[in-house]
Amino acid sequence: MQRVIVMKVIVFDLDNTLIDRQKAFTEMLKDRIELTLPEDKKHLKEQAVQDILMWDDNGTVSRSVSFKKYCDKYEVTCMTSEELSTYWTTISGSVVYLFDDVIDVITYLKAKYRLAILTNGSPISQRRKLESTGILNMFELSVVSGEVGIDKPDPRIFDVMCERLNVKPQDCLYIGDNYVNDVLGARNAGWNAIYLNRLRLASDETQMSDSLEKLKKIL
C-alpha cells in the first residue's frame, strides 16, 4: 500500500465501514420479514431473506427496489413495497454492530487528526445508527446525504464537508467500502481516499486495506 499524503481530516463512511450493515440487516430480515409473507408462503422465509440480501447487493441497491422485487415474487398483499420500505426506515438502525477494529483505531486516529463521518441514506435511519454506535462523540462532524439532498459519489457532498469543516479538499482523506461512491467520489472532489475492502474483492486499487487496524501503519 502506498503512503497516504499528509492530511488534517479523516472522514469515514458508515455502513460496512464502521458498522456491519449486512449483519444487522440480515438479523432484522430474519426477525421481521415473516410478518409480511402470505400464510401459504411463510415456510419460504429463509429463501425470502436470501433473495432480499441478493437484490440488496450489500446496500448498493435502493431498498425500495429490493422490496418491490420481494413483494412481486412472494405475492405480498398486506402492504405495498413502498409501505414496506417506509416501515423499514422507521426501524432501520435499531440493531447496530460495530466492527471489532473500530474503537481501537478511531481512538488512535483521534489523537492525530480531526475525524468526521459522511454517509449516504435516510436521516432517520442513519442518525439512529450513529446514536446507537456509542462513538458519535468521537467525531467532530457527521453528515447524512438525505439531510443535504446530495448523495455520494456526487463531488458536491464532499464540497459540503469541506465547507463545514473549513478545510481544503487536499487536506481530507476519505475511507469507505464502496469503490465508486466512496473512493472515486472523494477523488473526483479532490480528496485523498482509501478503499476499505473488508470483503477482499479483487481490485487493482493500490490505496486499499482489508481492515481499519492495518491503516494504523500508514496514518
Image: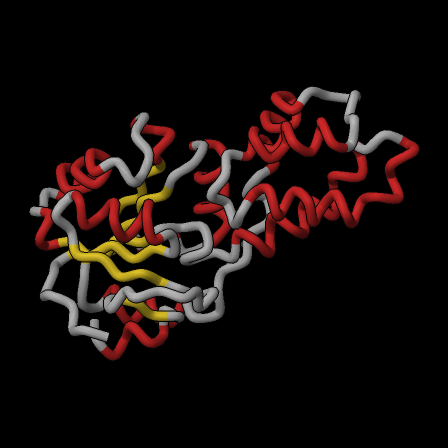
Point out the residue furthest to the right here: 40
Left or right: residue 91 compared with residue 202: right
Quarter of the figure that contains the N terminus: bottom left
**Position of residue 45 measured from the top left corner of the image (x, y, whole percent):** 80, 44
Looking at the image, is 19 positioned above or below residue 49?
A: below
Left or right: residue 87 compared with residue 60: right
What residue sits 39% from the left and 64% below the top?
Answer: 197
**Position of residue 41 measured from the top left corner of the image (x, y, whole percent):** 87, 36
Number of disc labels: 0
Front in this rendered view, residue 103 or 16: 16
What residue sits 74% from the left and 43% below the top?
Answer: 48
Point out the residue furthest to the bottom here: 217
Quarter of the figure that contains the C terminus: bottom left
Kindly indicate the quadrant of the structure image that contains residue 166: top left
In the rendered image, is residue 137 in sight? no
Kindly indicate the quadrant of the structure image that contains residue 193: bottom left
**Position of residue 52 measured from the top left corner of the image (x, y, whole percent):** 65, 42
**Position of residue 213 measured from the top left corner of the image (x, y, whole percent):** 36, 74
In the rendered image, is residue 185 in sight? yes
What residue sits 74% from the left and 32% below the top?
Answer: 73
Left or right: residue 202 compared with residue 43: left
Kindly indicate the quadrant of the structure image that contains residue 106: bottom left
